[in-house]
Image (cartoon, rainbow, N blue to C red):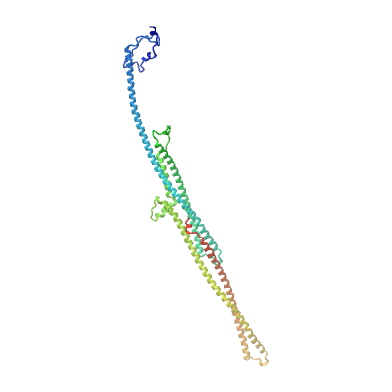
């Protein structure tokens, strides 16, 4: 009996096990209380009744059933929610993947456009550099004819006085010098315009290359993003990335379009050359589109080189023709001078012989004059009436007068011959001096200038090749 009275109840059968956590009522019934109280804390002195036992476990069964129904309801809602969430996430992910694919296609399209314009700009730059090299070579080639023309003018300033004239050769040489200066100015201006265009093309190409590089990197990144899946091992959480500040997509498209538009303009146009080409061809009834302007630009440079080369060669031909004509004139003048000098020398010799003959004739008259004068002198000693004007006296006096008149005439003729000989000598000196001038001028024009002009550049050299 003592064991029944003093044995402690297990903690599970204490009053705590009879408590209902959700209230004191189960199924609307009050939980029955024990019939007797506890004499000592922790020890039970009485037992539950059978109705209490039934009521207790029925309450537990009802509570468990309610909890199961609540759990099933939560499970059904949860299943619906996670299935909806799964479908929504998959749909959103599929939409995002599709947008990434479209974005990749857009990037690929713009990258291809950028690549095409970059290649076109590179072709244009290479072509313009080739034209620039030709223009520089053509400009260097003009230095030779310029130096030749100036040297020809300087050499011709050393012509002797009578031949120092402003003839057709000097006029053509002056035209050639002026033409070469104009050609050099035109080539320098065209070269400067090409250099400016090349700089603009390089700047546009650099912008396109930077944009292409950005799109290449963006393409690879978006391609990598497009390959991600839920099973990808290299994905991880990156908190805060969804709140990053991004640029407007419209600005992205406009940026690329502006770069391509700028590149297209630089491919096709140089402002100064554009106006020249379009204006010249519009005046001729032609219409130039942007797609063919670069061709017209190259054609303009080709035309400049061709026109300048033709102008220089034509002017060179004019100068050479003027030199040839002048040399022919000098040669003809020199031949005439030589012929005239030969005639003058012949006349000088004849006049000298004539003078000698006249002197001899005068000398020959001295004997007859002495005889006649001696006879007159001797007969002047006749005595008295013998000193009369007889026929011998008259004849002797007439003879003396005749001889004196003849001598006087011969002396006058001798004076005229000597004056003529002096004039012939002056003519000889003048002819020899002029002949020397013509010979020296002919040497300058033919032996120096025309020989030097054989070094004139060829058409290919003047064209920049």
Q: Is residue 213 above or below residue 35?
A: below
Indicate left or right for 278 with 401 as reference: left
From the top left corner, tell me how far across and down residue 276 is, in percent. Answer: 43, 53
Quadrant location of residue 403? bottom right
From the top left corner, tell me how far across and down residue 275 is, in percent. Answer: 43, 52
Depth check: 363 or 225 in front? 225
Q: Is residue 412 above or below residue 14?
A: below
Q: Quadrant of the N terminus?
A: top left
From the top left corner, tell me how far across and down residue 109 is, in percent. Answer: 39, 43
Is residue 411 in view?
A: no
Going 52% across and 69% down the picture, which residue do you hit? Answer: 331
Indicate left or right for 97 with 155 as reference: left
Going 34% across and 30% down the picture, which residue do you hit? Answer: 83
Q: Is residue 406 above or below residue 71?
A: below
Is residue 360 in view?
A: yes
Going 62% across and 87% down the picture, which residue do you hit? Answer: 397
Q: Residue furthest top?
A: 1
Quadrant location of residue 64? top left
């Amino acid at each position: 009996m003592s064991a029944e009275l003093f044995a402690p109840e297990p903690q599970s059968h204490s009053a705590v096990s009879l408590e209902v956590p959700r209230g004191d009522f189960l199924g609307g019934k009050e939980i029955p209380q024990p019939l007797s109280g506890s004499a000592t804390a922790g020890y039970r002195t009485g037992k539950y009744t059978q109705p209490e036992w039934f009521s207790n476990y029925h309450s537990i069964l009802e509570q468990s059933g309610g909890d199961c129904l609540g759990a099933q309801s939560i499970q059904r809602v949860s299943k619906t929610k996670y299935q909806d969430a799964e479908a929504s996430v998959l749909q959103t992910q599929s939409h995002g993947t599709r947008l990434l694919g479209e974005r990749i296609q857009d990037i690929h399209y713009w990258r291809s456009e950028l690549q095409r314009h970059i290649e076109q700009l590179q072709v244009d730059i290479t072509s313009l550099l080739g034209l620039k090299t030709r223009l520089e070579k053509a400009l260097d080639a003009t230095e030779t004819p310029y130096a030749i023309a100036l040297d020809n003018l300087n050499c011709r300033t050393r012509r002797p006085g009578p031949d120092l004239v402003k003839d057709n050769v000097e006029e053509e040489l002056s035209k050639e010098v002026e033409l070469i200066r104009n050609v050099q100015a035109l080539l320098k201006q065209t070269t400067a315009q090409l250099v400016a265009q090349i700089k603009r093309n390089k700047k546009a190409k650099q912008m396109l290359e930077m944009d292409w590089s950005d799109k290449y990197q963006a393409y690879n990144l978006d391609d990598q993003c497009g390959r991600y899946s839920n099973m990808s091992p290299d994905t991880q959480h990156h908190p805060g990335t969804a709140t990053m500040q991004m640029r407007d997509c419209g600005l992205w498209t406009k940026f690329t379009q502006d770069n391509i538009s700028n590149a297209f303009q630089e491919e096709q146009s140089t402002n100064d050359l554009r106006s020249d080409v379009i204006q010249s061809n519009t005046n001729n009834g032609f219409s130039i589109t942007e797609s063919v302007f670069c061709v017209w630009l190259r054609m303009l440079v080709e035309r400049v080189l061709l026109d300048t080369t033709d102008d220089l060669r034509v002017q060179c031909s004019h100068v050479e023709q003027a030199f040839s004509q002048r040399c022919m004139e000098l040669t003809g003048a020199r031949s005439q001078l030589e012929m005239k000098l030969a005639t003058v020398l012949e006349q000088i010799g004849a006049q000298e012989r004539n003078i000698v003959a006249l002197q001899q004739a005068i000398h020959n008259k001295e004997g007859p004059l002495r005889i006649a004068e001696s006879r007159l002198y001797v007969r002047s000693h006749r005595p008295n009436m013998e000193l009369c004007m007889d026929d011998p006296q008259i004849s002797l006096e007439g003879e003396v007068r005749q001889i004196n008149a003849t001598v006087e005439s011969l002396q006058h003729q001798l004076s005229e011959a000597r004056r003529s000989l002096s004039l012939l000598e002056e003519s000889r000196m003048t002819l020899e001096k002029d002949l020397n001038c013509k010979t020296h001028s002919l040497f300058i024009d033919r032996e120096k200038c025309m020989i030097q002009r054989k070094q004139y550049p060829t058409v290919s050299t003047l064209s920049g090749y």
